[in-house]
Image (cartoon, grey):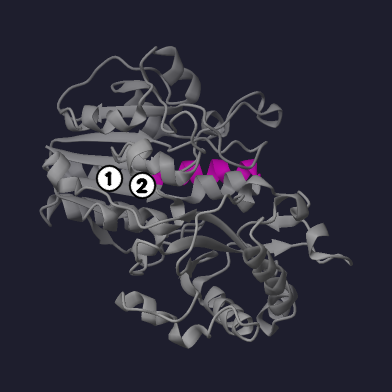
Amino acid sequence: MKYIIILSDGMAGRPLELLGERTTLEAARTPVMDALARVSELGMASMVPEGMAPGSDTANLSVMGYDPKIYYTGRSPLEALSIGIVMEDTDVSFRCNLVSLTEEEGAYEDQVIIDHSSDEISTEDAAVLVRALSEGLAQEGYTQGHTVTHALRAGGLCPIRYAFFTGTSYRHLLVQKQGKVVELTPPHDILAKRIGDYLPKDDILRDMMKKSYEILKNHPLNEERRKQGLKPANSAWFWGAGRRPSLTSFQERTGKKGVMISAVDLLKGIATGADMDRILVEGANGGLHTNYEGKAFAAVKALTEDGYDFAYIHVEAPDEMGHQGIAKDKITAIENVDGKVLNVVLEGLRRAGEDFRLLLLPDHPTPIEVRTHTKDPVPYLLYDSTKSVEGAETYSEKTCALTGKNWPDGYRLIGHLLQEELC
C-alpha cells in the first residue's frame, strides 16, 4: 500500500456574495475531486490547536502528525532547517519577508502594507535585495555584511549578532546570536493597515525595519520593477521568531519511508527536521503559475519507482491567492490542483497498478474576505483504491461538514490515513 497527502494550502474558505454565497472551493470546477468524493470518506479536521495561531507552520505540523503543542518552536527555525542554517541553542531566527509598502510622504510608521509578497518576487531578484539589505545594515553596525554570514552555516562561533539568509521568493531569514523570542505580527495579517501599530517593540528589530525601507526604496532593482508595473520590495518585515526545533524521525514514527515535494522553505524545513527526503521540482515556485504537473509526476515516480511508501505534495498557490484577495485566481489555483495534481497522481498510480490511500485537504482556510488564515476546521477527503464507501456528490466545506465526521485533534488524522495509531 502506498500513501499520499495532497495538501492544497489555504484552499478552504467562506461563502462569498460575489460567488452566489459559495466558497471558492464550491465555485471551482473540480471534476476529479468530486468523482473521488462519491466513493471516499469525507469529514472535517481541526489542524490548529486552541491557543495557537492559525499558521501554515502549526497546521502542516498537524497534518504531518506532529502535535504542535509538543513540537512547535516557531516558524522561521523550520525554514532555517530547509536552507541549511545550523542554529545553536541560544540562536533565534526570524522570518524576513520582503514586503511592498505604500510610499506616501511622512514617517515609516504611517505606511501601509499593500503586498506581503512583493508581487511574488522572484528568488533571483530577492537575492539582490537581501544582499543590499545586509550590506546596508552593516554600515549601520547591525551586521558585518552578506559575504560573511555563511559562518553560521558551519555551526561555529560567529562574531555577527545578526545575519541574513536568502530563502525563496519573498521568504527570507534573519538569525540573531544570543537572541530572545519576541512577539511579532505576520504581515499577511495586516494587509491594507497602517504599520505603526504593529511594528516590533524590540528597539533593534524596529530600527532595522525602518532602515530597510531607506535602503530598499530607491534601489535600482526596485526602480526597474516599477517600470515593469511590479510592486517594489521596499521593506523587510520580521516575524515568526523561534529557536531550533527538534522533530522525531517520520520513518521511525510511522515505519514509512517518506518524501516531501514543496517549493516552500517551511515545508522543506519540516521534512528536514523529520528526516524525510525532499524532491525539488524545476519551475515549482509557490505561486499561481507553479509547476503543478511536475510535482505530481515526481510523487508518482517516488512511489512507483524509487521505493518510497509515502509522499506529501504541498501546493501553496490557493493560499497565496487567498492572501491576495482575488477570488478568480484562487478558483484557478484550486482547479489546477484538481486537474494538474490530483488527476495526474491518480492516473499514474492506477497505471502502475499500485494500491494506495490518498488524503486531500487544506491545512487551514484562507478566506478571500479576510485575506489571512483562520482557525476553522478544514474539509478532508480520504480515498482508498482497494475499496469504496458512500460519500457525497461533491467535495466542499459544506458536504464534508454534513457527514458529522470530525477530528478535533487534527494531528491524529494521518494515523487514520496510515491505518495505525501514532503517538
Instruction: Residue 343: give x, y in percent of width and height.
Output: 33, 42
Question: Disc 1 marks which residue?
Answer: 345
Q: Is residue 321 left or right of residue 163?
A: right
Tell me the SS state at disc 1. Answer: helix
Residue 333 located within the stretch drawn in magenta: yes
For residue 170, what is the image quadrant?
A: bottom right
Residue 77 located within the stretch drawn in magenta: no
Question: Disc 2 marks which residue?
Answer: 341
* Nearer to us in this view, 13 or 416: 416
Instruction: Residue 332: give x, y in percent of width and height.
Output: 54, 45
Q: Is residue 62 above or below residue 323?
A: above
Which region is colored magenta? 325-339
Instruction: Residue 151: give x, y in percent of width and height.
Output: 37, 81
> Which amino acid type is marked by label 2?
Val
Could you tell me which residue is drawn at 67 percent across and 73 percent down?
212
> Which amino acid type is marked by label 1?
Val
For residue 159, what is the image quadrant?
A: bottom left
Q: Are marks 1 and 2 in contact (CB under 8 Å)?
A: yes
For residue 229, what is the image quadrant?
A: bottom right
* Nearer to us in this view, 125 or 97: 97
* Nearer to us in this view, 152 or 161: 161
